[in-house]
């Protein structure tokens, strides 16, 4: 069975994508989301995935996919090739997040970026009370097994956007089992957040 948080995230991302759009999913996993977009939204889709097992799973689903390392750039993909780029739970795993975001917005008109929020109250409480790297439902890895190489909060992401050649169109904190447009203390309460990004002037 799919993880409920993954299902919630998929639904939230799909709600932001117009029917018939060209969509690339960077770090697409097993292609579950792209398959839904193709079947349910009539989207033209492409995945990019490094993990071989996930790459094979995409092929098995009939989802077009490239096996590539996002840390090495997207120079083989022409500018403006896609309407939307999905970058879900992957930003914190790449070596140079700002450079990758700017490349994403070179190839796509809009980016849908989902990030974990290390400012969540459970994370803060574990650090204060236990003095250890936190493990939560949304951050389920022990520190020595985690694929995350960067740790950011919602405030950190806003600061990053100010440094880049893009702007935040929408910020949707994910609190519990729903996204909240206007949330009270979102940096404390949200376990993750969806950001809709675009280049200035688009």
Image (cartoon, helix red, strand yellow):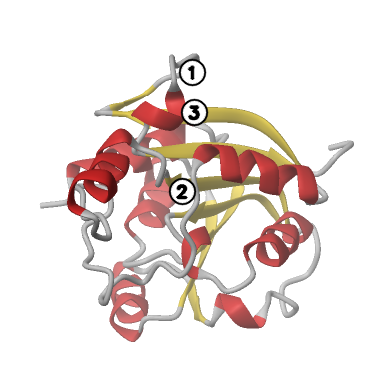
Label 3: few (<14), some (14–19) or many (≥20) C-alpha neighbours in 10 Å: many
Task: Give the residue displayed 25% in from the left and 54% down from the top.
Answer: 134
Q: Earlier in the sequence, mark 1 or mark 3?
A: 3
**Label ID, residue 48:** none
x and y percentages locating residue 185 in the rendered image:
44, 20
Q: Earlier in the sequence, mark 3 or mark 2?
A: 2
- Judging by the rendered image, the residue that carries numbered circle 3 is 172
Q: Is residue 21 left or right of residue 48?
A: right
Mark-to-mark CA distance, 2 and 1 = 16 Å
- Judging by the rendered image, the residue that carries numbered circle 2 is 115
Q: Earlier in the sequence, mark 2 or mark 1?
A: 2
x and y percentages locating residue 96 in the rendered image:
64, 70
What SS does tag 1 mark?
A: loop
**Viewer-proximal residue among 145 and 181:** 145
- Judging by the rendered image, the residue that carries numbered circle 1 is 181
Q: Is residue 7 left or right of residue 113?
A: left
Task: Give the residue displayed 53% in from the left and 58% down from the top.
Answer: 45
Q: Is residue 72 left or right of residue 12?
A: right
Residue 167 seen from this side: yes
């Amino acid at each position: 069975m799919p993880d409920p948080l993954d299902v919630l995230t998929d639904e939230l991302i799909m709600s932001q994508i117009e029917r018939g759009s060209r969509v690339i999913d960077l770090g697409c996993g097993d292609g579950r989301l792209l398959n839904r977009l193709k079947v349910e939204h009539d989207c033209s889709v492409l995945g990019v995935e490094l993990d071989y097992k996930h790459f094979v799973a995409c092929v098995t689903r009939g989802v077009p996919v490239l096996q590539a390392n996002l840390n090495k750039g997207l120079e083989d993909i022409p500018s403006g090739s896609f309407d939307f780029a999905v970058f879900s739970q992957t930003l914190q795993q790449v070596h140079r997040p700002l450079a990758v975001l700017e490349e994403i917005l070179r190839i796509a008109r809009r980016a849908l970026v989902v990030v974990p929020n290390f400012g969540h109250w459970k994370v803060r409480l574990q650090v204060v009370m236990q003095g250890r790297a936190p493990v939560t439902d949304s951050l389920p890895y022990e520190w020595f097994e985690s694929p995350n190489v960067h740790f950011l909060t919602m405030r950190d992401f806003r600061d990053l956007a100010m440094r880049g050649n893009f702007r935040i169109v929408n910020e949707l904190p994910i609190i519990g089992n729903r996204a909240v447009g206007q949330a009270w203390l979102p940096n404390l309460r949200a376990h993750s957040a969806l950001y809709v990004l675009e280049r200035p002037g688009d």
